[in-house]
Image: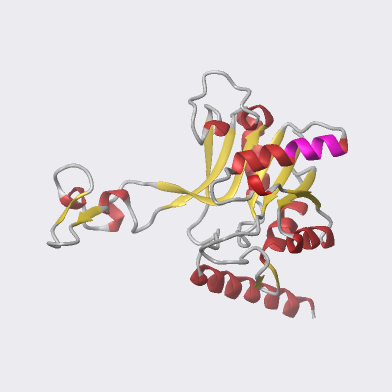
Amino acid sequence: MKTLAIVLARAGSKGLPGKNIRPIGGKPCVAWTIETALNSSRIARVVVTTDCPHVRAIAASFGAFAVGRPSSLASDTATVDDAARHALVATETHNACDFDAIALLYGNVPVRPADLINNAVALLDRTNCDSVQSYTGVGKHHPWWTCRVDETTGDVTPWEGDRLNHGVYRRQDLPAAHIPDGGVLIVTRAALMLELSDVHSGPHAFLGNNQRGILTAEGSVIDIDTELDALVADAILSQRTEALTGSSS
């Protein structure tokens, strides 16, 4: 399976401006994702799609091919799959080749398990599914513990059903529940290009019908959206770098 890694790193971010080029653990944030993709044995080529000249320069310095993303695909309302399709077509045209699968990687995720991408590609290849996405446990933010609080009266009512917290008050008694963590998303070319039949229309149509998940340990993936996320990622990666430097000296 010939897999292309597309690193998504647009310039704009309302939550944390400049997060993709922000120094994290001694490197620009996006550089960690580029390096992980380049070091993945199941990835044939790495491309960065961006509208940011600084990200383009970072991509070039690390040996990744950069695709200029048009402004229409870099707004708050632009979709990930539209940007990915643009990058895929540009890359295949430039290299005169076709890819079987595409790994969508967010540039603002500097912390992920080193083998996560390879394992996800292997699962896609082994099962012939349409997509593989990484998930982590929701922890104490479980849907059964979601409620509604009236802003005026303070009344607390269940989000769904008629019993608050579904009658469960110990975390260990909650059924397993998972959410996408942003670590990796692998899709077949046919799924990304919306070439599959009988797929429900909508923003997730590019995931296809046969979707699989790969689980990650709590805290092993850090998706930077807030200042706290950035501080935690910086601390983890700085510690790893110091450990490697110490062991090699």
Q: Residue furthest top?
A: 197
- Asked if residue 187 is positioned above or below residue 56 in the image, the reply reads above
What scheme was used to colour the molecule? secondary structure
Q: Which residues are magenta?
A: 88-94
Q: Residue at x 61, y 39 (%)?
A: 81
Q: Nearer the viewer, residue 158 or 210?
A: 158
Name the residue: 22% across, 43% down: 160
Query: In which quadrant will I find the N terminus?
Result: top right
> Where is residue 27 drawn, in percent x and y?
71, 70
Left or right: 116 with respect to 135?
Answer: right
The main secondary structure of the magenta stretch is helix
Give the residue at x 61% y 58%.
112
**Quadrant position of the C terminus in the picture:** bottom right
Left or right relative to 178: residue 223: right
Instruction: Indicate yes or no whether the magenta region holds residue 51.
Output: no
**Residue 38 location in percent, x, y?**
77, 53
- Residue at the limit of the structure toward the front, as seen here: 72
Compared with residue 49, is residue 200 higher up or lower down, i.e. above or below? above
Q: Position of residue 138 (x, y in %)?
A: 40, 53
| 142 or 29: nearer the viewer | 29
In the image shown, does 187 or 126 lie closer to the viewer? 187
Above or below: residue 130 compared with residue 178: above
Q: Residue at x 59, y 50 (%)?
A: 75
Residue 58 x/y as whole percent: 78, 63
Q: Quadrant of residue 107?
A: bottom right
Query: Is residue 90 one of those drawn in magenta?
Result: yes
- Counting labels gives 0
